[in-house]
Image: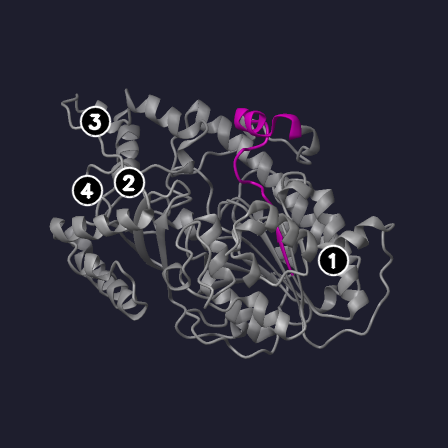
């Protein structure tokens, strides 16, 4: 792969030339052309939006997502939808390969293996026009993604300008009309990813670029929002949650503008639209983990004349690995060999499907290249999580610890034992976690040592082991020998070597007070 930045920019400019020429014209007037029988595919993604933030998924913030709610009213929303891994780049790589991260090569911020077939390659071969707005570099290597139009963050108001998403989406739809081609467009908002609207992080990161970033159509005050149940409701946490929800609203603005561009084209009636988030909110116990709030995503599908409007699927589990098989199925194309997922097109059309009663999720590596392998199995009732990295020494560090929330939790832990326990759990975990997610969706009560749940825990551990063996997961032996500190230590030595980092930070071993042991220096 050519990683030269100049070469990448030249390649993207070349791919986007058709759209760039269109953008130089006056606002195009759509002319109804001959439509292909194959459906158009529009995928709209949010960046770090929690599963329960939109109003249609139970969000309590007033008038938070009118456009996402409207989309849900026109199609189906899934109660049990999950992305496969709660990290931006590998999550998106799963969508476009139908394979688990340890099977496509993109476990962290690496490119996929060049031997793996992508959805874009298959659509390109069958005559689709492929386009992407935002998060372009999160699908790599670029040569494996046959973009006919690519506009990245710098051309989209740092990925936060709804009007620019409208402009480029409209240009792209016009190109599809002019070429008489079915299209695939992946429109990726950079909201509500950090930095949140109105935060000090935003001012420090964007500085002079702030003038190019529009404010959300509604900015929220602290008294208008609720702190999620997996976090303590203390002042700085509450403040950051309000900033987050303002960014959620701007993401909704972008969804509305992309859908407006589609509605103004003659293509809307033959377009399968899906909306989802690539992972949960970038706060402790959500993004970069395997909790319910890490991987559950607000997945919506709309397809006029095919999907019954205003429906809710409370039965089936769908996952990121199923996106590519479903799109191929909807387009009438053959299934690509080697995919781990399978099409949920029958579910979209209102039929029952077997083998959709659970989901397997995972984590490998943070953006800082630290390896924290995690594996998880969830069904409608329970969730079992395996943390082979947890040795009471290794300290968990991720993006979610930036900003106000985690610092506020650390400060509060000095005098609040409950918050201190949450800080300790987040930083050190336990080798096994087991939760009754049906009654404890915020994962506040680890039941792994409770004898009442031993039978169910053993059953789910065995199911996870079987899945790991089927998919050739390198953590199989670690889970098989989860009671052996020697086996876990050996596995983690291999993981550390794989990370490319010379040294993994351990907690200090000098004597401290029991309270201070809970805090990171």
From the image, tell me which residue sits under label 4: 391
Of the two numbered discs 3 and 2 on the same chain, state the one appearing first in sequence: 2
From the image, tell me which residue sits under label 2: 502
Name the residue rendered at 43%, 31% in the picture: 402
Q: Nearer the viewer, mark 4 or mark 2?
A: 2
| 10 Å crowding of disc 4: few (<14), some (14-19), many (20+) | some
Residue in the foreground of this view, choosing between 260 and 469: 469
Q: Are marks 3 and 2 in contact (CB under 8 Å)?
A: no
Lateral position of residue 162 relative to residue 322, left or right? right
Name the residue rendered at 33%, 46% in the picture: 500
Q: CA distance from mark 1 to mark 3?
A: 55 Å
Q: Nearer the viewer, mark 1 or mark 3?
A: 1
Of the two numbered discs 3 and 4 on the same chain, state the one appearing first in sequence: 4
Q: CA distance from mark 3 to mark 4?
A: 14 Å
Of the two numbered discs 4 and 1 on the same chain, state the one appearing first in sequence: 1
Residue 517, disc: 3
Q: Quadrant of residue 105?
A: bottom left
Q: Which residues are magenta?
A: 185-209
Q: CA distance from mark 3 to mark 2?
A: 25 Å
Residue 320 visible in this rendered orientation of the protein:
yes
Q: CA distance from mark 4 to mark 1?
A: 51 Å
Q: Secondary structure at mark 1?
A: helix
Q: Nearer the viewer, mark 3 or mark 4?
A: 4
| 10 Å crowding of disc 1: few (<14), some (14-19), many (20+) | many
Of the two numbered discs 1 and 3 on the same chain, state the one appearing first in sequence: 1
Name the residue rendered at 25%, 62% in the picture: 460
Residue 415, disc: none
From the image, tell me which residue sits under label 1: 172
Q: CA distance from mark 4 to mark 2?
A: 19 Å
């Amino acid at each position: 792969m050519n990683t030269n930045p100049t070469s990448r920019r030249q390649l993207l400019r070349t791919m986007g030339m058709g759209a760039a020429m269109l953008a130089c014209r006056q606002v195009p007037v759509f002319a109804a052309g001959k439509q292909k029988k194959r459906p158009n595919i529009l995928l709209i993604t949010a960046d770090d939006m929690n599963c329960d933030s939109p109003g249609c998924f139970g969000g309590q913030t007033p008038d938070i997502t009118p456009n996402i709610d409207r989309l849900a009213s026109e199609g189906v929303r899934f109660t049990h939808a999950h992305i496969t891994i709660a990290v931006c780049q590998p999550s998106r790589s799963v969508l476009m390969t139908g394979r688990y991260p340890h099977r496509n090569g993109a476990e962290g911020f690496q490119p996929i293996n060049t031997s793996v077939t992508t959805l874009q390659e298959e659509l390109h071969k069958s005559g689709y026009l492929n386009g992407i707005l935002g998060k372009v570099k999160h699908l790599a290597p670029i040569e494996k993604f046959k973009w006919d139009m690519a506009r990245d963050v710098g051309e989209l108001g740092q990925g936060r300008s709804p009007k620019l998403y409208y402009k480029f989406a409209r240009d792209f739809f016009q190109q599809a009309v002019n070429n008489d081609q079915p299209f695939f467009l992946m429109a990726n908002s950079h909201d509500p990813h950090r930095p949140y609207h109105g935060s000090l992080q935003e001012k420090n990161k964007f500085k002079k670029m702030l003038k190019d970033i529009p404010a959300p159509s509604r900015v929220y005050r602290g008294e208008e929002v609720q702190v999620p149940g997996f976090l303590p409701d203390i002042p700085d946490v509450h403040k950051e949650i309000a900033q987050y929800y303002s960014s959620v609203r701007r993401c909704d603005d972008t969804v509305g503008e992309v859908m407006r561009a589609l509605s103004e084209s003659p293509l809307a009636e033959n377009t399968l639209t899906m909306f989802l988030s690539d992972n949960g909110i970038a706060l402790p116990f959500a993004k970069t983990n395997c909790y319910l709030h890490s991987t559950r995503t607000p997945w919506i599908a709309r397809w006029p004349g095919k999907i019954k409007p205003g429906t809710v699927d409370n039965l089936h589990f769908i996952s990121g690995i199923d996106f590519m098989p479903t799109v191929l199925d909807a387009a009438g194309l053959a299934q690509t060999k080697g995919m781990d997922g399978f099409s949920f097109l029958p579910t979209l059309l209102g039929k029952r499907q077997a083998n959709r009663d659970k989901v397997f999720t995972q984590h490998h590596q943070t953006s800082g290249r630290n390896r924290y392998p995690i594996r998880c199995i969830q069904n409608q009732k329970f969730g079992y999580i395996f943390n082979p990295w947890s040795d009471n020494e290794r300290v968990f560090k991720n993006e979610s610890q930036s900003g106000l929330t985690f610092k506020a939790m650390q400060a509060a832990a000095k005098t609040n034992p409950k918050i201190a326990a949450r800080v300790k759990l987040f930083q050190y975990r336990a080798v096994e976690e087991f939760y009754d997610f049906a009654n404890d969706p915020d994962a506040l009560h680890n039941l792994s040592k409770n004898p009442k749940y031993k039978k169910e825990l053993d059953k789910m551990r065995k199911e996870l082991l079987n899945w790991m063996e089927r998919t050739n997961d390198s953590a199989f032996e670690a889970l098989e020998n989860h009671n052996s500190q020697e086996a876990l230590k050996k596995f983690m030595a291999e993981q550390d070597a794989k990370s490319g980092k010379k040294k993994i930070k351990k907690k200090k071993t000098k004597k401290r007070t029991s309270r201070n042991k809970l805090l990171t220096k």
